[in-house]
Image (tube, rainbow, N blue to C red):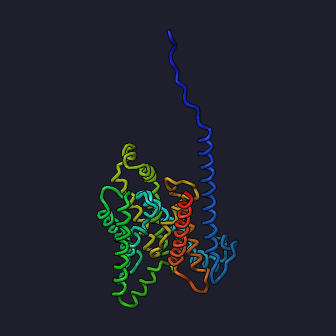
Amino acid sequence: MTGPTTTTAPAPDPVSGARRRAHRRRAIATTATLTALAAAVLLASLGAGDITVPVADVVRALGGRADRPTTTVVLTWRLPRALLALVLGAALGLSGAVFQTLTRNPLGSPDVIGFNTGASTGALAVLLTGAAGYTRTALGALVGGLATAALVYALGGRRSTATTRFVVTGIAVSAVLTSVNTWLMYGADTSVAARAAQWTAGSLDALGWEQAVPALVAIAALALATALLARTLRALELGDDVATSLGVRVVRARLLLATVGVALTAVATSVAGPLAFVALAAPHIARLLHRRTPGTSLPGAALVGAVLLAGADWVAAHAFAPVQLPTGAVTVSAGGGYLLWLLLGRRRNDRTV
C-alpha cells in the first residue's frame, strides 16, 4: 500500500526576489529625488524675482513666521503661480500617462492627438466672445476637449483607442483645429485677439489665488479619480482580452479613463493656455527613470510633469530677466529637443542591430 502523495510548493526564485527588491529601492529613490527637485524648484520660484527673498525667509514665510512684506511677496504674489506650475504639470503628466497607456502608443498624449488643441478651441471661443472669466473659460475648455475626444473616437474607430488609426486621426483633427483657432483669432477684435494670442502662447504670469484655488480643487478631485482607476488602467495594459477576463468592462473603463484624462488637460489648458510636450515627455522620462518599459507609473509621471513645468516656468520668468518668456515657448523648445534626442537615440540603436 502506498502512502498519500504530497506536493511541495516550488521554491521561491532568489533572483526574481532580488530584482523586485532592487526595483522597489530604485522606485523609492527616484520618487524621493523627484520630490526633492520639485521642492527645490518651488523654493527657487518663491525666492527669485525683482525682490529677492533668501531661502530661509521663504521657509519662514511658508511657516507663517516672516514679517508682513516678506509674507506678502511669498504667499500672495508668488505662491499661487509656483503651486500652479507644479500642480498643472502633475495633471498633464497624469493625462499623458493615461492616454499613452490607452492608445499603447508613445505618441498618444493629449497634446499630440488633438485634445489639448480642442480644449484651446473651446476656451478661445469663450475668450473671443468677451465672456472672459475663469469658470466660463474652464467650462469652454472642458467642452472643447471632450467634443474633440468624441470626434477622434468616432473617426478613429469605435472599437478601441489602442490603434494607430486612432492616433493618426487625432493628429489630423489637431491640425484642423489649429487652423480653426487661427481663423478665430484673425476674425476677432484687435484687443480681444491680442489677449487671446497671449493666452495661446501658454503662460502662468499674473495668476493669483482666484485662479489657483478652483484649479487646485478640480485637479485634486481628478487625481483622486485617476488613482481609483489606476488598477483598471494596469489591467488594460495587459490587453482587452486579459482585462475582460479579470472582470473589467473594457468599453466603460476606457470611456471613464479618457474622460478623466481630457478633464485633466482641459483644466490645465483653461488656466495657463496650451502647454505642449509636458504630457508627452513626462511619461517617457518616468519610464526611463523607473526602467519600466511595459507601462508608466502614474505617480512617477505626475512628479516628472510637475518638475518639468515648474522648471520651465522658472526659466521663462527668470532666465532672461528682465524679459519674461511665455512658459509654453520653453516647454515647446525643451520638448522639441527631447523628441530629437529620442529619435537620434533610436536611430543609433537601429544601426547597431
Report the side of 279 relative to 168 (left or right). Answer: right
Res. 341 image quadrant: bottom right
Query: Between residues 308 and 56, which one lies in front from this camera angle?
Result: 308
Does 164 sit above or below residue 312?
Answer: above
Question: What residue occupies the far top of the structure in this picture?
Answer: 1
Q: Residue at x 60, y 86 (%)?
A: 322
| Number of disc labels | 0
Asked if residue 208 shows in the view, the reply is no
Query: Between residues 314 and 282, which one lies in front from this camera angle?
Result: 282
Does 113 sit above or below residue 48?
Answer: above
Q: Residue at x 34, y 49 (%)?
A: 249
Q: Quadrant of the C terminus?
A: bottom right
Q: Position of residue 11 (x, y in %)?
A: 58, 32
Query: Between residues 79 and 279, which one lies in front from this camera angle?
Result: 279
Query: Between residues 168 and 311, which one lies in front from this camera angle?
Result: 168
Question: What residue occupies the far bottom of the structure in this picture?
Answer: 190
Q: Position of residue 274 (x, y in %)?
A: 45, 74
Asked if residue 252 shows in the view, the reply is yes
Q: Residue at x 39, y 91 (%)?
A: 190
Q: Position of residue 306 (x, y in %)?
A: 54, 66
Report the side of 116 relative to 315 (left or right). Answer: left
Does 327 sit above or below residue 91?
Answer: below
Res. 98 image quadrant: bottom left
Q: Residue at x 46, y 65 (%)?
A: 219
